[in-house]
Image: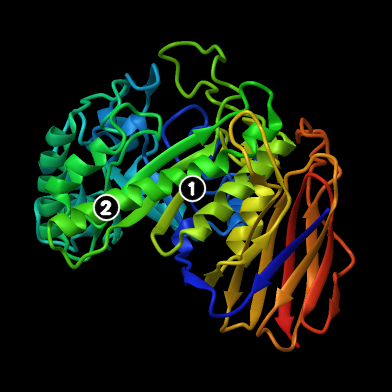
Amino acid sequence: MKAKITLAKEFKIGEIDKRIYGSFIEHLGRAVYGGIYEPDHPTADEDGFRGDVIDLVKKLNVPIVRYPGGNFVSGYNWEDGVGPVEKRPKRLDLAWGTTEPNYFGTNEFMKWCKKANTECMMAVNLGTRGADEARNLVEYTNHKSGSAWSDLRKKHGYDEPWDVKLWCLGNEMDGAWQMGAKTATEYGRVALEASKMMKWTDPTIETVLCGSSSVNSKTFGQWEAESLDIAYDSVDYVSLHQYYGNHDGDTMSYLSYTLQLEEFIHTVTCVCDYIKAKKHSKKTMMLSFDEWNVWYHSNNAPYERWSIAPPRLEDIYNFEDALLVGSMLITFLRHCDRIKIACLAQLVNVIAPIFTQTGGGIFAQTIFYPFEHLSNFGRGVALNPIISSPKYDCKAYTDVPFLESIATFDEENEEMTVFCVNKSMNEGMTLDVNLLDFDGYKPFEFISMDGYDKNDVNSFENPFVKPHNNPLPELDDKTLTAQIKPFSWNVIRLKKM
């Protein structure tokens, strides 16, 4: 089949905020203990951080990592995780039915961020706690000295403030599963006061209001409108969360879920703009899609209740999952004028692109590679391509394009990249890319993931699902022609020669 993309420099959607390639570490399963932190591991450094994990995190080029939750944060006392480790209490984590030993806390995570070349997106507990504890944490992490909490940080051995700039005002507070769940009005009031007091403590920070826990939430839309109506003037972003799974084994419907994702983003944007108009505000609310991924493989896995860091949510991702993850991130770039932050949930072991063996090896999951390509090559501005593509019908949607695509343009380095997914399981695609005003740009790399069965997975023994390089596409005048394999992930990089 044939498809066509038309690109021009003026087809600009917006600047791509590097934080759109963020991720997430929660005190859940083996994300922390046995994931980023394992003092007895052969690659562990003097702080107990696994070096092999840090190496793969650096390959992903993750600019920001949300911490410490997640559902966990709604019952977390941050004070438990600072100070001498031997004096820290063990607590029952009601969110996940485990015991939290608090060997690893705020300062350890901030040190890990420095070593992993990333920054922290800190979440505060607005479930069982409130505005006072939240502003105290800001004082502990960000105030230089001369106050009780900043001096306590110095007493703990950290003279300089961590200068955390981005803060989540709780987590999924609409969910009945959340400790301290609230109505939209209750949450809006707490979030307003917390954000206000946190910003009084450090006026340089930004805050993220909790949106609905899912597009399927019964109060979706209403929750955003009511909480934003109260807290709009004090917050900087509203969050979105969404996970997908192929529960029915229907691949073509599964890959069509980006259409639902488009609807979700559009709806939240409209609600934000309605509140802006209602308040006669000059501020445009931006979006933080701070939980997203595929999640369904490990939902019913057993574990020992009240144990420390038992394996939880350890999805092993297959090839079709990689195609959906790539398509979801392409969708975020299509809305980069409003989506400034996004966090792949999570980073290590727990529904994650990186998988470790406690005391042993490590491998990159299938979903690692589309994220790596986009994070490293998808910088600059996003271009909205005019796409002509054959379409298909499935149980979930009709008229689904086989081709999912976005282009990015890095003007400073004179590079342009086309990312695309061919969703057809059987047919290849001759793709013509019309480069209207990219004079002198020529392809220098063509990467793809193709030829795999939809159920192929990586493992410690055989991590074989990975990208490879292809012969360069043909370039005739201003038309680039690429042969796109069936059921594939593709990256075409061009540079001005």
**Label 1 amino acid?**
Glu
The quadrant of the image that shows the C terminus is bottom right
Q: Secondary structure at mark 2?
A: helix
Which sits in the foreground, 356 or 230?
230
> Which x, y percent locates residue 418?
68, 66
| Mark 1 Cα-neighbour bin, 10 Å: few <14, some 14–19, many ≥20 | some
Task: Answer above or below: position of 21 versus 84.
Answer: below
Circle on res. 393: none
Does the CB distance between marks 2 and 1 fall below 8 Å? no
Query: Which quadrant holds residue 281?
Result: bottom left
Task: Answer above or below: position of 327 versus 417.
Answer: above
Query: Which quadrant holds residue 253?
Result: top right
Mark before the other along the chain sequence, 2 or 1: 1
x 84%, y 78%: residue: 475
**Label 2 amino acid?**
Cys
> Which x, y percent locates residue 294?
57, 35
Label 2 – label 1 distance at C-alpha = 16 Å
Residue holding disc 1: 262
486 lies left or right of 391: right
Residue holding disc 2: 272
Query: Which quadrant holds residue 392?
Result: top right
82 lies left or right of 391: left
70 lies left or right of 189: right
4 lies left or right of 109: right
> Which x, y percent locates residue 378?
59, 65
Q: Secondary structure at mark 1?
A: helix
Task: Answer above or below: position of 315 versus 407.
Answer: above
> Which x, y percent locates residue 324?
63, 42
